[in-house]
Image (cartoon, helix red, strand yellow):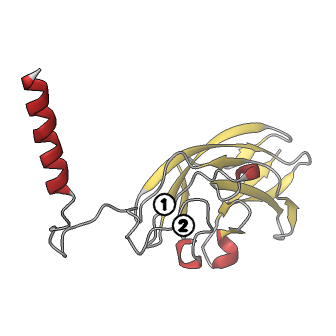
Amino acid sequence: MRTILTVALLLAAFLLAGCSGDAPKDAPRPVGAASDPISPKPDTPLPDRALKAELTLAEPLTTLKPGEKKTIKVKVKNASDVLWIVHGTGEGSKYRVAVGNSWLDSKGQLVTNMDGRYGLPLNLAPGRDVEVPLAITAPAQPGDYILELDIVQEGVAWFKDKGSEVLKVNVKVQ
């Protein structure tokens, strides 16, 4: 019993010492800490300067059959200086950060923007990347199309609407 009491007292002393606030002012703080000025709060819109991404395909994509369903791997890089908190818990997945795609015809006119969507699996620090699977469906009519890939914060904005570059891939549907 005396050993348990001694351990409990030592643990309490260490906890109190750790909370004394005597850490040096230049001590690094973990990214995402509440006092970190570049970290957004959960379940809020990301600031506009956070909506910068770089997208690439893990493998080339050149042709699909009409109506073909395919899962592609998209590499998503946070090209901003802000931590992306990617899991929204609002109703309807509001504030979730996801990769999505649109299909454009050969002249760049929208065919559909309601194709694939896949939420990022983890919070993404500035400069970091993650590869995600995205299920897409080729247009039903044969022809030359543009697969446009972008990032969206659900209920807030597509990143391209805030100045981020999208990835455009020419795809022949035949």
- Nearest the camera: 100 or 104? 100
State which quadrant residue 112 falls in.
bottom right
Looking at the image, residue 112 lies above or below residue 7: below
Instruction: Identify the residue shown where x is 86% and y is 65%.
Output: 110
Between 40 and 159, which is closer to the camera in this rendering?
A: 40
Position of the C terminus, as image quadrant, is top right
Residue type at mark 1?
Answer: Lys
Q: Is residue 94 left or right of residue 66?
A: left
Q: Which residue is mark 2?
A: 53
- Secondary structure beneath label 1: strand
Judge whether 123 appears above or below 150 on screen.
above
State the residue at coordinates (67%, 62%).
152
The percent coordinates of residue 92 (x first, y second) are 76, 50
Query: Disc number at residue 29?
Result: none
* Of residues 121 and 20, the one drawn nearer to the viewer in this rendering: 20
Query: Residue at left 56%, top 55%?
Result: 86
Residue 73, how many percent across, how many down?
A: 58, 44
In primary-sequence order, the first of circles 1 and 2 is 2
Image quadrant holding the N terminus, namely top left
Q: CA distance from mark 1 to mark 2?
A: 6 Å
What residue is disc 1 on? 77
For label 2, the crowd category at 10 Å Cα-Cα, with few meaning under 14, some 14 to 19 and many 20 or more, is: many
Amino acid found under the numbered disc labelled 2: Ala
The kind of secondary structure element at disc 2 is: strand
Which quadrant would residue 153 be assigned to in this image?
A: bottom right
Find out whether the residues at labels 1 and 2 contact each other: C-beta distance under 8 Å.
yes
